[in-house]
Image (spheres, rainbow, N blue to C red):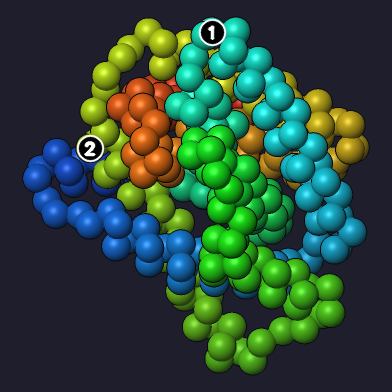
């Protein structure tokens, strides 16, 4: 019973903040997703990543192992996702990338904070950065048929990661007044991302039911197995082990819908997949945490 109560304390803030965004839309209130997302991804999230890495007590060697484990996890998941897509006779442009890339930002970072504190966040931002690089290059190629490697250099969160890693390795720190300012800006990221997730889910339109639900189950089960196997293979300690499994198994990201819309894939079916996988996560995230804590 104690473990159930502990898990509820972790997931309740996540789903409560997402519910605020969902209810906000139901009441017809204005919410500019494009503006809020841009604010979060170009300012708040990079500050959060930078300060988390700069202040973390995690040894650089431990973080590098998590990087390798993350890369290996996404490599294996990419192959298995291709098998799922081809096995079900689906369009690779529509379904391949969403099965691979989870909501490591909107859901993964808050879960890591609430479950494992600042240490968990330090590991989570590294996995998030790996996913971001992969999704903005190979991920876009999967959907559009053309790469976008140059976009990586334009992403502030990539520079936040690189600078944070540099400060961590060198043992540097910014002046207190600047650190406090960056902390305040970074603290916006988690509530903004969760509320925006609720808004986005409320606005998405369902076009199918059975197939998205099946794919959501396959995505979750495959990702958990891959994350678990890679964490054991790289002999990760308990906290990075749990954070890797959580991050890899998060539901389909809303950005998958936006990319599908932009590059002419079947955006309506991706929207259905986002909604069903997010709803499924209401059950799967607490269940996963029960086994990880």
Disc 1 crowd rating (10 Å Cα; few below 14, some 14-19, many 20+) is: few
Look at mark 2 in the image and give the residue it sits on.
Answer: 203
Which residue corresponds to the image point at 85% horizontal and 63% vertical from the top-left?
60
221 or 157, which is in the foreground?
Answer: 157
29 or 76, which is in the foreground?
Answer: 76
Which residue corresponds to the image point at 61% horizontal and 89% vertical from the top-left?
176
Q: Position of residue 96 (x, y in %)?
A: 55, 26
Q: Is any atom of residue 49 visible in this view?
A: no
Q: Is residue 267 above or below residue 197?
A: above
Q: Position of residue 67 (x, y in %)?
A: 78, 50
Q: Are marks 1 and 2 in contact (CB under 8 Å)?
A: no
Which image quarter is the C terminus in?
Answer: top right
Quadrant in which residue 285 is drawn = top right
Label for residue 88? 1
Of the residues tagged 1 and 2, which is closer to the observer?
A: 1
Which residue corresponds to the image point at 66% horizontal and 66% vertical from the top-left?
161
Which residue corresponds to the image point at 63% horizontal and 22% vertical from the top-left?
81
Q: Is residue 282 above or below residue 55?
A: above
Q: Is any atom of residue 218 visible in this view?
A: yes
Q: Position of residue 288 (x, y in %)?
A: 61, 26
Q: Position of residue 151 (x, y in %)?
A: 55, 61
Quadrant in which residue 228 is drawn = top right
């Amino acid at each position: 019973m104690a473990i159930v109560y502990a898990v509820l304390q972790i997931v309740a803030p996540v789903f409560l903040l997402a519910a605020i965004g969902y209810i906000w839309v139901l009441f017809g209130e204005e919410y500019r997703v494009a503006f809020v997302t841009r604010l979060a991804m170009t300012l708040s999230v990079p500050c959060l990543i930078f300060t988390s890495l700069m202040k973390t007590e995690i040894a650089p060697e431990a973080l590098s192992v998590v990087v390798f484990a993350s890369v290996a996890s996404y490599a294996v998941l990419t192959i298995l996702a291709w098998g799922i897509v081809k096995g079900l006779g689906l369009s690779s442009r529509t379904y391949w990338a969403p099965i691979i890339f989870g909501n490591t930002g909107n859901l993964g970072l808050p879960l890591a904070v609430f479950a494992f504190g600042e240490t968990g966040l330090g590991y989570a931002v590294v996995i998030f950065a790996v996913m971001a690089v992969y999704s903005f290059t190979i991920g876009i190629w999967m959907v559009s048929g053309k790469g976008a490697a140059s976009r990586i250099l334009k992403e502030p969160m990539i520079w936040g990661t690189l600078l944070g890693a540099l400060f961590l390795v060198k043992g540097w720190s910014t002046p207190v007044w600047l650190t406090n300012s960056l902390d305040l800006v970074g603290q916006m990221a988690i509530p903004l991302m969760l509320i925006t997730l609720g808004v986005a889910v409320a606005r998405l339109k369902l076009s199918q039911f059975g197939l998205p639900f099946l794919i959501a189950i396959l995505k979750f089960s495959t990702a958990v197995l891959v994350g678990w196997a890679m964490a054991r293979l790289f002999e990760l300690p308990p906290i990075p082990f749990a954070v890797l499994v959580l991050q890899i198994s998060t539901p389909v990201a809303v950005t998958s819908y936006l990319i599908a819309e932009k590059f002419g894939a079947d955006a309506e079916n991706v929207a259905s997949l986002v909604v069903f996988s997010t709803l499924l996560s209401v059950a799967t995230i607490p269940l996963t945490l029960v086994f990880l804590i």
